[in-house]
Image (tube, grey):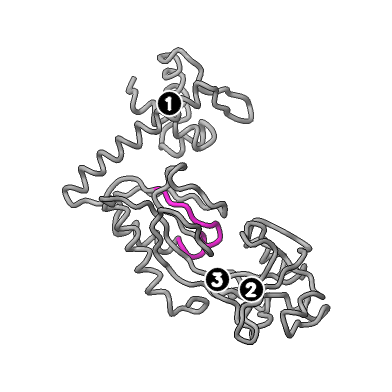
């Protein structure tokens, strides 16, 4: 048995959440994947996975082996990529974290351009609004929207993102249109629950910062879902332009309080400080920064 391939198969099954999904990921048959994992368990003399009709679960031995095997596989990929990069090639694996909605709508075109230029690089993109720990969770790069924490990570600005308050025309017809942030107290407000500052929206009133704090009628950890709630007339929502403006163009949302400019938020790339940055990571950083520089004049961006 090829031990290296068996380790790769085992990790693929765990990461994909099942034998069938792991087989699809690797391009193998279900039978081959199942046989490789069974042989690996037999050779090690321990059970790595507990199999049920609905799910797979790692045993304690499986968790330990996955951690060690994953580290060895990553080090091997890093070694091979480093040797290739010495020959001027850009290859290897990169793991990228980004917020879900931004990743789907804004990041994928840039990653498509990167993939066309560097087909030997394997991208592992994780889209979730949770702020990951780059070093502890083995990410090469993260996209962060909003205020940054103090850290040893390097931050590179991608863009600034306008923020607006939006509401459905039907909601405004029923509840009226607020003319000043103070008038929001009579309205239903929807809250993005992962916002670090809590239920609050920022404005500029008479040239000074103004923060409106509220008790939300609905909180949700997904921006797209909150935008949909606003479209359905459930309340006002404070969202980046890339989510709201397409719905304004469709007539499903309308901007509110435009006279009180809301401060734009920064979108940044974060990565660890290294003496020698891998060529593949440098190439991805440059591609993303170049892409958003080119797109800066498009509607909804600044």
- For the N terminus, the image quarter is top left
| Residue situated in front as seen by the camera: 195 or 246 | 195
The quarter of the displayed image where residue 205 is located: bottom right
Q: Residues under labels 3 and 2: Cα distance?
A: 18 Å
Using residue 242 as the reference point, say whether residue 93 is left or right of it.
left
Q: Main secondary structure of the magenta part?
A: helix
Q: Residues within 10 Å of mark 3 (few under 14, many from 20)?
A: some
Q: Residues under labels 1 and 2: Cα distance?
A: 56 Å
- Looking at the rendered structure, the secondary structure element under dot 1 is helix
Tag of residue 202: 2
Going from N to C along the chain, the mark reached first, 1 or 2, is 1
What residue does disc 1 label?
Answer: 32
Q: Which residues are magenta?
A: 95-107
- Residue 100 within the segment the image draws in magenta: yes
Residue 35 appears at what percent x and percent y?
Answer: 44, 21
Q: Residues within 10 Å of mark 2 (few under 14, many from 20)?
A: some
Residue 180 appears at what percent x and percent y?
Answer: 73, 83
What residue does disc 3 label?
Answer: 242
Q: Residues under labels 1 and 3: Cα distance?
A: 44 Å
């Amino acid at each position: 048995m090829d031990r290296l391939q068996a380790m790769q198969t085992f990790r693929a099954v765990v990461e994909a959440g099942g034998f069938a999904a792991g087989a699809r990921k690797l391009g193998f048959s279900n039978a081959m994947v199942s046989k490789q994992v069974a042989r690996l368990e037999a050779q090690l003399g321990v059970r790595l996975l507990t199999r049920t009709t609905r799910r797979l679960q790692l045993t304690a031995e499986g968790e330990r082996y996955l951690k060690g095997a994953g580290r060895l596989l990553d080090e091997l990929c890093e070694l091979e990529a480093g040797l290739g990069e010495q020959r001027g090639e850009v290859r290897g694996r990169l793991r990228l974290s980004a917020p879900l909605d931004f990743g789907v709508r804004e990041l994928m075109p840039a990653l498509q351009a990167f993939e066309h230029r560097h087909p030997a690089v394997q991208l592992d993109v994780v889209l979730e609004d949770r702020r990951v720990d780059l070093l502890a969770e083995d990410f090469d790069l993260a996209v962060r929207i909003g205020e940054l924490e103090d850290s040893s990570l390097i931050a590179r600005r991608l863009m600034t993102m306008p923020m607006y308050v939006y509401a459905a025309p039907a909601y405004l017809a029923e509840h009226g249109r607020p003319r000043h942030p103070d008038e929001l107290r009579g309205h239903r407000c929807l809250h993005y629950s992962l916002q670090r500052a809590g239920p609050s929206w920022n404005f500029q009133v008479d040239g000074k910062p103004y923060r409106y704090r509220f008790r939300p009628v609905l909180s949700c950890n997904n921006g797209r879902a909150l935008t949909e709630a606003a479209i359905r007339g459930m309340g006002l929502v404070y969202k980046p332009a890339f989510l709201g403006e397409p719905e304004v163009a469709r007539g499903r949302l309308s901007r509110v309080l435009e006279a009180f400019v809301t401060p734009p938020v920064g979108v940044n790339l974060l990565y660890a400080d290294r003496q020698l940055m891998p060529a593949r990571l440098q190439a991805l950083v440059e591609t993303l920064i170049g892409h958003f520089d080119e797109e800066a004049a498009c509607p909804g961006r600044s």
